[in-house]
Amino acid sequence: MSAKPLKQTLRPGSRLSGFWLSLCSPTVTEIAAGSGIDWLLLDMEHAPNDLSQITDHLRAAGSANPDAQMIVRMPSSDQTMTKRLLDIGVRSLMFPMIQTAEAARQAVSWTRYPPEGLRGISATIRANDYARQTDYLSTYAEAQCVIVQVETPEAVAEIPAIAAVPGVDAIFIGPGDLSSAMGHTGNPMHPDVQEKIREAVAAIHAAGLPAGILGYGADLAQRYFDEGIEFVAIAGDAWLLTRQMDALVQTMAQPSPTLTQQTHKD
């Protein structure tokens, strides 16, 4: 387990860079955690990470960096999956496609034991160090970080109500789905989409919560940080590997300037 929970570092005004992991490789997770990145997200919604793999990712990250801040984005907002992820030791969850305050309230309820919520109790789980952590039932919520995603204009309009739900710790903007919902599929940089993102960030901050977003690449990530967004996914593992491999291949396919000059002289 990491020494400190994400909830302690993800605050309004913070500046946390993250890697979005979708290659389903604990080795990649270990490498990413060892970089000193502020947070990592394991994607189960748009990547074939399954439940049986998540523990290996947590162990890999912890071995590389005991303070690794791990988030898991669930395949869907689902009560049973929430319970199972929490039981294996996931402390920070991202719930996709939250459209209303009621959906946010329901998601939070799945993370809390009765009477505050609906989470079922199992006595011997990885989350409580296999029953060695005797105060787990009274302290678990202190380490939990519940992040909800807003991904449509309708959800953006509901941010004040969503943010007011007790237990919602942060709101993450999904620029890809937001742009699609606005009729600009594949173009999250469209001026209308960027304006909607600024509207969302303003509403999140007005509610006193930190905002997050995907912003791959140094230029875009820096722009989002400068606009006050607290946690930005600065790259994805598949995105980064593809770009770097392609760039290296293209570079090596070009003749060396020195060799070209020598050939012309000969």
Image (cartoon, helix red, strand yellow):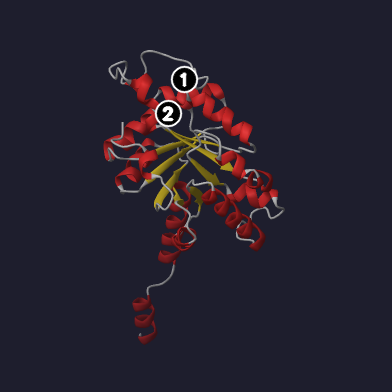
- Residue 212: x and y in percent read 49, 48
Q: Would residue 76 be visible to someone looking at this image?
A: no
Q: Amino acid at mark 2?
A: Gln
Q: Identify the residue position indicated by label 2 in the image.
A: 53
Single out the residue that lies furthest toward the right: 183
Q: Would residue 143 be visible to someone looking at this image?
A: yes
Q: Identify the residue position indicated by label 1 in the image.
A: 113
- Residue 214: x and y in percent read 51, 51
Of labels 1 and 2, earlier in sequence is 2
Q: Foreground: 169 or 265? A: 169
- Residue 117: x and y in percent read 51, 22
Residue shown at the point (49%, 29%) measured from the top left: 50
Single out the residue that lies furthest toward the top: 123
Q: Foreground: 55 or 150? A: 150
Q: Which secondary structure lies at badge 2?
A: helix
Residue 172 left/right relative to 218: right
Residue shown at the point (37%, 73%) measured from the top left: 256
Above or below — where is 223 with respect to 110? below
Q: Quadrant of residue 39?
A: top left
Q: Which mark is residue 52?
A: none
Q: Foreground: 159 or 28? A: 159
Q: Amino acid at mark 1?
A: Tyr
Above or below — where is 69 with respect to 135? below
